[in-house]
């Protein structure tokens, strides 16, 4: 499928989600759908660095929270509409991603992963001591009473997140099939060889951390309007970091489709578990699925299907 | 790793995935008939950081359900609870409450435990115009100003100020009058709020603040903090802390021997059976806030019957075996809601809210009436002093006289022993 056709498919899906806000009365589906879409963005963002480039980021919660807190910081200062705040969160988190890239890309493998984990902790400490955004006590953000065109603010949030998911997925697919994406794949496979073959590895890695960070920021930006109250432990929740890694791993980290499948499966399962099993145990589902997939299908569902359908016996 | 071509059936998978998503979220709408039970929905912290208190609250609400069903139900209909574990995670709360309202079709909602998970539910309650009974939300409604929100923590309309008002009132009663105060607390949500109030009260009382600092919430060894306080030699020491730090501070103060007229104030945790048992006689002399203690002045109708039922279950359930701090209030919250439903003769949220707003309720935690912002119209934060604790047994705390009420005067049950070192 060409990028052009794919663009229209994605655009079509955004329009479908807009139609859903008119067709479905029950708000619960929008709350649940929002979370799943949010994970599509987060997992896709993680995958650009983790799956495509091979640099494992355990600090996703930090980027997510930075996106959310950018919204809070700006709203407490000037009252901008959400659609204007989202790009700001993207820019801020893109810059954080770029800075992370500069600071840590000399590190590889497990040391890079540790550095990203540390980044999240540093960010959380900063936020917890920044009075303007509520510090450790947390901050309230009141949803606007009315929003144009939509019947309720939640429908608007759902649609906004579907738009962000569309942007993230389109970007990931575009990158995967571009010269840039092939460069990232070369870095993932062997950074030394890639460099000696003329791949500008530093530049590509910085672009990768920036885009990945920016997309995570987009996922976090509307969060505070979803919960209306934000404090550091909930924004920097381990759940985001774990899911951002687990979803692409389960779906398939080498393709743009992997994180989407992973997010829908795992995110959906968690939503159901919250109201059925109803306990923190639902994070156990993630853990078990991750272990199973790492052993049975290290390339995730996408890799598994490819292997089953491939005519090439070696694959 | 080898770079492979994308598998040809990508599109099919994409649509399949979308279909799966819709299938996943459209499970199980419930049906409802007229003479069905009255369903009350809530999310509760049953796992995560606040699980201990959340479980105790759930037990209390279940006791209330059994009590009311034994007495013939609500409006002649049995009461059924529908609840989910919010995992002490605010992000779970909006989904849980919309599911309760839209899919489980509950008739009434109440909150879970703690500000962080109460606040995200308020906009949902507002959206559906539902009465929302809140269990220990600290100033949660301040920004929303929702007129159907009612909160059972007895801190009154200005919780920050009221939290320490009694402490300073008691301090100024001491003879000779204190002149200096040290304020210390954790760098976290509740302690920060409590310190803001304490500062205001200290200034109003004309005390000179000679020490005003916070410590990181992860602090384990408090002797540097206490030594620093000792070096400025304050008459009064006000502490705002969470349970682990409360224990650490009490131990340090005992070891280092603090010379102050009054010590305590806003320490969370020393009201819990686990800490009372662990600290035992080290608690003697501390003046601290509380919500309910087994003193004769606070012997409200129904409280003993409730505690008896609670304590019978608590030990096996692994929650606070005494249950003085939170459980009676979880029960009282339900009593208020039930009385309003019975009095208005239906489930009209508008009438129920009106009734709660304009009436006084007799509950197991005393008479409750609500003010304009849904908080208690008048604060009943108690200041109690730990006295005559001999060992580390739990039974002594079930007797009157181990935690005497000093403030407010209406509930006073004993006299202050000062200075602090005399009561030790």
Image: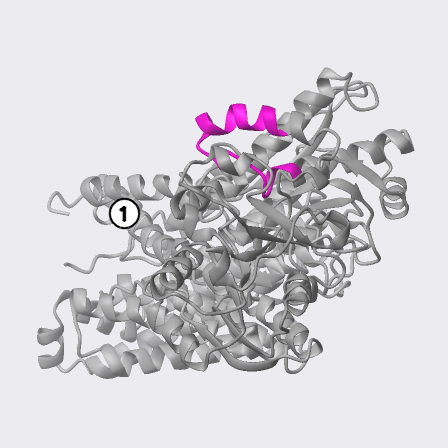
Q: Quadrant of residue B163?
A: bottom right
Residue found at x 73% / y 59%: A150
Q: Is residue B44 left or right of residue B316?
A: right
Residue B164 position within the rendered picture, expressed as x and y whole percent measured from the top left: 64, 64
Q: Is B276 rendered above or below residue A185? A: above
Residue found at x 69% / y 37%: B296
Residue B31 position within the rendered picture, expressed as x and y whole percent measured from the top left: 70, 25
Residue A94 position within the rendered picture, expressed as x and y whole percent measured from the top left: 41, 78
Q: Is residue A304 left or right of residue B60?
A: left
Could you tell me which chain the residue with mark 1 belongs to? A
Residue stretch rendered in magenta on the structure: B307-328
Q: Nearer the viewer, residue A49 or B191?
A: B191
**Image quadrant for the C terminus of chain B?**
bottom left
**Residue B241 at least partly seen:** no
Q: Nearer the viewer, residue A119 or B118?
A: B118
Q: Is B261 rendered above or below residue A238? A: below
Q: Quadrant of residue B261?
A: bottom right
Query: Is-magenta flag for residue B322?
Result: yes
Residue B254 position within the rendered picture, expressed as x and y whole percent measured from the top left: 38, 60
Task: Specify how the rendered protein is coloured.
Answer: one colour
**Residue B129 at least partly seen:** yes
| Residue under label 1 | A300
Q: Nearer the viewer, residue A270 or B265?
A: B265
Residue found at x 50% / y 36%: B396
Total labels drawn: 1
Q: Is residue B393 left or right of residue A200?
A: right
Query: Is-magenta flag for residue A232?
Result: no
Q: Secondary structure at mark 1?
A: helix
**Image quadrant for the N terminus of chain B?**
bottom left
């Amino acid at each position: 499928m060409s990028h052009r056709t794919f663009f229209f498919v994605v655009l079509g899906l955004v329009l479908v989600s807009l139609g859903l806000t008119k067709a479905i009365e029950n708000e619960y589906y929008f709350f649940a759908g929002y979370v799943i879409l949010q994970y599509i963005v987060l997992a896709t963002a993680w995958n650009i660095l983790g799956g495509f480039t091979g640099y494992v980021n355990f600090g996703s919660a930090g980027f997510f929270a930075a996106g959310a807190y950018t919204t809070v910081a700006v709203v407490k200062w000037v009252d901008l509409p959400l659609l204007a705040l989202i790009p700001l969160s993207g820019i801020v988190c893109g810059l954080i991603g770029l800075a992370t890239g500069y600071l840590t890309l000399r590190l590889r493998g497990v040391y890079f992963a540790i550095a990203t984990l540390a980044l999240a902790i540093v960010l959380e400490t900063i936020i917890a001591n920044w009075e303007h955004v509520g510090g450790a006590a947390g901050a309230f953000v009141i949803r606007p009473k009315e929003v144009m065109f939509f019947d309720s603010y939640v429908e608007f949030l759902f649609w906004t997140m579907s738009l962000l998911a569309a942007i993230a997925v389109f970007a990931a697919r575009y990158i995967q099939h571009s010269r840039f994406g092939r460069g990232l794949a070369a870095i993932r496979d062997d950074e030394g060889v890639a460099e000696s073959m003329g791949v500008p590895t530093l530049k590509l890695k910085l672009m990768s951390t920036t885009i990945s960070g920016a997309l995570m920021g987009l996922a976090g930006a509307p969060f505070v309007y979803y919960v209306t109250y934000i404090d550091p432990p909930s924004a920097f929740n381990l759940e985001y970091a774990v899911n951002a890694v687990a979803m692409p791993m389960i779906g398939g980290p080498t393709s743009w489709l992997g994180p989407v499948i992973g997010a829908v499966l795992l995110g959906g399962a968690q939503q159901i578990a919250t109201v059925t099993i109803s306990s923190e145990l639902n994070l156990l589902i993630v853990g078990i699925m991750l272990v199973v997939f790492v052993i049975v299908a290290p390339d995730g569902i996408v890799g598994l299907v490819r292997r089953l359908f491939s005519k090439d016996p070696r694959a | 790793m080898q770079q492979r071509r994308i598998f040809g059936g990508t599109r099919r998978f994409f649509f399949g995935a979308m279909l799966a998503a819709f299938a996943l979220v459209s499970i199980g709408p419930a049906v409802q008939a007229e003479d069905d039970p009255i369903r009350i929905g809530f999310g509760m912290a049953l796992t995560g950081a606040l699980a201990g208190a959340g479980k105790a609250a759930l037990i209390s609400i279940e006791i209330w359900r059994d009590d009311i069903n034994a007495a013939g139900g609500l409006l002649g209909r049995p009461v059924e609870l529908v609840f989910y574990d919010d995992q002490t995670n605010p992000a779970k709360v909006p989904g849980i409450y919309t599911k309760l309202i839209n899919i489980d079709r509950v008739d009434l909602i109440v909150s879970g435990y703690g500000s962080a998970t109460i606040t995200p539910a308020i906009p949902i309650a507002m959206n559906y115009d539902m009465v929302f009974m809140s269990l220990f939300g600290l100033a949660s409604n301040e920004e929303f100003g929702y007129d159907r929100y009612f909160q059972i923590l007895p801190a009154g309309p200005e919780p920050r100020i009221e939290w320490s008002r009694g402490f300073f009132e008691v301090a100024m009663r001491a003879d000779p009058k204190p002149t200096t105060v040290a304020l210390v607390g954790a760098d976290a949500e509740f302690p920060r709020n409590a310190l803001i109030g304490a500062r205001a009260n200290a200034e109003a009382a004309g005390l000179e603040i000679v020490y005003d600092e916070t410590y990181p919430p992860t602090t384990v060894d408090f002797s540097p903090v206490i030594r620093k306080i000792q070096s400025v030699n304050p008459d009064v020491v006000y502490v705002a802390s969470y349970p682990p730090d409360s224990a650490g501070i009490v131990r340090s103060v005992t070891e280092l021997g603090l010379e102050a007229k009054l010590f305590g104030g806003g320490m969370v945790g020393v009201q819990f059976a686990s800490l009372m048992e662990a600290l035992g006689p080290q608690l003697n002399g501390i003046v601290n806030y509380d919500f309910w203690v087994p003193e004769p002045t606070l012997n409200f109708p129904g409280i003993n019957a409730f505690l008896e039922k609670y304590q019978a279950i608590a030990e096996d359930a692994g929650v606070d075996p005494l249950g003085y701090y939170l459980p009676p209030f979880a029960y009282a919250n339900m009593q208020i809601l039930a009385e309003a439903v019975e009095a208005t003769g239906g489930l009209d949220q508008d009438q129920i809210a009106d009734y709660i707003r304009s009436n006084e309720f007799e509950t197991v935690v005393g008479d409750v009436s609500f003010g304009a912002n849904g908080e208690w119209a008048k604060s009943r934060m108690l200041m109690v002093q730990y006295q005559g604790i001999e060992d580390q047994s739990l039974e002594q705390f079930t007797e009157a006289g181990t935690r005497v009420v000093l403030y407010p005067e209406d509930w006073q049950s004993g006299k202050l022993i000062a200075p602090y070192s005399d009561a030790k």
